[in-house]
Amino acid sequence: MESAGAGMAEEGNIERVEDSKDLQQQSKALDKLTDHVEDRQLDSTRVQEAMASISASKEADLNAMKLRERELAAVKINAAEIDIIANELEMDKKVAERTLREHKGDAVAAIRYLLRT
C-alpha cells in the first residue's frame, strides 16, 4: 500500500509541475499581449507626431508657394512680349506669361529657357 500511496504522491507532484509550466506559459503569453498593447500606444504617439510634422511641413510649403506667387505677380511685364512669345513659340499665353515673370520680365532669357525645354 505504501507503494500505491507513494505513486499517488508522485502523480500529484507531476501534475503540479505541469500546472506550473502552464501557468508560466500563460504568464508569458499575457506579458507578450501587454507588451504588444504598450507598443501600439507608443506607435500611435509616433504616428501623431509624424502627422503633425507633415502638416507643419505642408503648411510651410503652402506659405512659400504663396510668397513666390506674390513675388511673380509683382514683376512688371510687357503684354506685347507675352503675345509675341505665345504666337512665335505656339504656346498658351498663360505659360508664356508665367515664364516671362519667372525670368523677371527678360523676354530673351524667357525665350531661351523655353527653347531649351
Image (cartoon, rainbow, N blue to C red):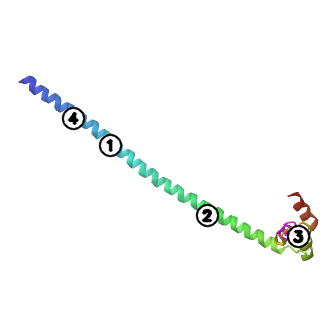
Image disc number at residue 55: 2
Q: Residue furthest left?
A: 1
Query: How many angstroms separate mark 2 from mark 1 (CA)?
Result: 42 Å
Sequence-wise first label, 2 or 4 = 4
Image disc number at residue 16: 4
Q: Amino acid at mark 1?
A: Ser
Sequence-wise first label, 2 or 1 = 1
Count neighbours of disc 4 (C-alpha within 10 A) and say few if under 14, some if 14 to 19, many if 20 or more.
few
The majority secondary structure of the magenta stretch comes to helix
Q: Amino acid at mark 4?
A: Arg
Residue in view at x 90 percent, y 70 percent: 87
Q: Is residue 34 left or right of residue 61?
A: left
Residue in view at x 9 percent, y 25 percent: 4
Say whether residue 22 is magenta. Answer: no
Magenta-colored span? 95-103
Residue on which disc 1 sits: 27
Query: How many angstroms separate mark 2 from mark 3 (CA)?
Result: 38 Å
Please tell me which residue lies in front, 60 or 117. 117
Q: Is 77 above or below relative to 2? A: below
Count neighbours of disc 3 (C-alpha within 10 A) and say few if under 14, some if 14 to 19, many if 20 or more.
some
Q: Is residue 36 left or right of residue 55?
A: left
Count neighbours of disc 2 (C-alpha within 10 A) and say few if under 14, some if 14 to 19, many if 20 or more.
few
Disc 4 is placed on an element classified as helix
Tell me whether the residue at label 2 lies in contact with that at label 4, contact meaning CB atoms closer than 8 angstroms: no
Disc 2 is placed on an element classified as helix
Residue in view at x 53 percent, y 55 percent: 46
Residue 55: x %, y % from top left: 61, 63
Q: Is residue 92 left or right of residue 40?
A: right
Residue on which disc 3 sits: 86
Q: Which corner quadrant holds the C terminus?
A: bottom right
Sequence-wise first label, 2 or 3 = 2
Query: How many angstroms separate mark 3 from mark 4 (CA)?
Result: 92 Å
